[in-house]
Structure formats: structure tokens, C-alpha cells
Amino acid sequence: MRNLAARFLPVLVAITVTSSGESAHAWLSPAVTSRPATTMKTDQSPKPHFEKTVHEFGSVLAGEVVQFDFEFVNSGEGTLEILKITPSCGCTTAGEFEKVIPPGGKGRIPVKVDTKKLSGPVSKSVDVGTNAPGAEATVTLSMKGEVRPLLLIEPAKLEFGAMQYVSLRGKSVEKSFTVTAKIDRPLTISNPRSSNPNFSATVKPVEAGKKYEVTVTLGPNSRPGSNGAYIYVETNYPEFPELRIPAAVFANAPLDVMPSQLVLTSNRKATVTRAFYVRNNLVAPVQVSSLRASDPKLKVSLEEVTRGMAWKIRLEAPADYTAPEKGDTISLNTSHPDVPELVIDVFERKPDAKATAQIGKGKKE
């Protein structure tokens, strides 16, 4: 009796996604679960038999939604139950399906893939768990194909690399990326902007309607350690109205703080606590003092980890704190003449009505 009960425990079902890029949009909410409703005799086992377990959807353009119904029949002598479907991420999804299928009955499991953030060869699998015994309890369904990008961004990430902080002060450095249409449709790129005021961007056509160059300027106010920004541009493609490209530079300095930026999500329900680490990269010890926040709602404290060499900053951002558009700062003074002040930027990611995409990316630079 114990073995019989074990045979018909609910079997985990997960919808998983593996591809060369990020993946699609949820169709059915996760963790749709049920317990077996049918008590079966040992000689009345269900058996799911699918017409096909692999669907080749060919070549599609990024942004298209691919859907296929995997049809099956219960070829066993017992009632078949689909017990649980759980997407492993908010990517590929399953639609509505019959959960109880009598012997000889038919059913289908619709699977949908949103290719908006995909490119290149794509392979996705759906594990369907049932009350069938043994190895037949789980059936793997696959969707495979190729997603052709509408746009190509090269490089996908703009790396200024590691530079000396002293040499960066008061100077500007430029790097560029290109956006190219990969289909026969006129392209327009406009409204370049940056999430960090020390990074700015301009756009110019290389081949009108086909290819554009976006030049990113790293301004003279880089801070010690890591400096980063997102560069945004708008396109006339409704599939990708806005593109987001990361840019970064590391300024080697006698002292730095890591990370140098905090991006909070909006509509938080609880206090956010984060730790930051101040590092002295020299041999001689230094002093730090006057830790402060530009908004009193941000609570900060300083702990010396290694005398004169390393410190830990603790920050608490309450749920009712909202960062202004230009952000807030956490600052502290140092006794080193080349780095009299270290600053941590605090921003908030606001909800955006426009869909942001990273598509058809070339190699990093």
C-alpha cells in the first residue's frame, strides 16, 4: 500500500527556458497545482501519449510570438491527470489545458514563446508532470528555432576599462556603439540620454535609415572606483521603442568605495539594507570621517574594519523613501589629498511605460 501511494504523489512540473538570450513573457501564472483526484487500481494506470514532443518553429523575427498546441491522448486504462505546471522563470508559458482526461480521451497543452528578447538559435523545453507511474510521469516537450534580430547593437556593452583616477579628473573620454537595422525597414534613432550625469550621449547617422552611431562621453567628474550608466535611445520600431546599453569605467584611485552606486526599486514594501566597503589601496593608513546622507531618511553608519585601511558603510533606505530624479548621495571625507571625498550615488528605478529591450547584441568592447 505504501508503494502504491508513493507512485501517485504529485510530480513536479516546470516550464524551463534555455536559449542564447533572455526569454519571453508569462502567459499562465506559475505553480498551477492540483492533487490527484482519482484513486486507481494497480492495473488501471494512465499513459500520456503525445503526437509530437518537439516542435520546430523555423526562423522568426525578434518580437514575434510563437505558439504551438502539443496534442496528446490518454492511451492507458486509468484517468490521466495533469497535476502541476510551474514556469521556472517569467519566460515561456503554457495556456489553459484540460487537467483530467479519461482513458482514450484527448487533450492539448498550448505553449507560447515571446521572442522579444531572444536572438540566434533557441531551444525551450516544457516538462509536463502527470499522475502516470514511473518514467512516464514526466513528458518533455520542446520548441526549437532561430530568432533573427531586427536590430544589431555593437558592442553590446560599452567598456571604458580601468583608468587612473588622477588622469581622469577634469578630462573627457569618448567611446561609441552602433545600432544597425537587420531588416528592410527604415530605422530612426533619437533622444539619446544617460542615467548618470557624468555620461552623456549623441547620435548621428552612418547610413541614413539603416545604421547609426551613438557616441558616449565620459565626463570630467568620474569618482574613484566603479562608475556606470545606462545609455538610452529611442527607435521608430514599435517592437523596440527604447534600447538600453550599459556603459562602465573603473577609476583606479588611492581610495575607493564599492559598490559606488545603489539603484532602488520603486514601490518597495520594506526597508532596504545595503553594505558598502571603503578600501585604502596605499601602504600608509588614512583617516575617514563625516559620513553623511543628502536625505535624512537614509540612515548610514560607519565601521572601521582594519585600522586606517578598510571600512564598512551600512545604509538603510525605508520603504517610504523616494529618491529624486537626480538621485541622492552618501558621502564621507578622507585625509588623502588626491581623494578628499568619496561619494555613493543613490538612484531609484522608476516604472517605464516603454518596453526596454536588449536585442541582437554584438560582442562587448
Image (spheres, rainbow, N blue to C red):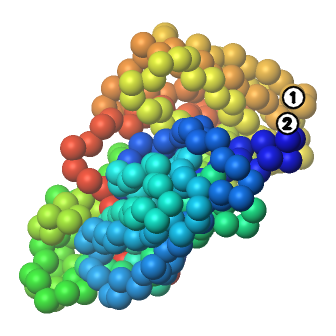
Whether residue 233 sits left or right of residue 323 in the image: it is left
Is 263 placed above or below 90 here?
above
Name the spot of residue 61 as percent of width and height, x first.
Answer: 27, 80
Q: Position of residue 132 (x, y in %)?
A: 65, 58
Q: Mark 1 sits on what residue?
A: 305
Q: Are marks 2 and 1 in contact (CB under 8 Å)?
A: yes
**On-image quarter of the N terminus:** top right
Foreground pick, 248 / 139: 139
Which numbered mark, 2 or 1, is in the foreground of this view? 1
Label 2, residues with CA under 10 Å away: few <14, some 14-19, many ≥20: some
> Element under label 2?
loop
Check disc 1 and give the amino acid type: Val
- Give the camera-side residue of 15 and 203: 15
Residue at image coords 35%, 69%: 69
| Residue beneath the point at 12% across and 67% down | 236
Residue behind mark 2: 309
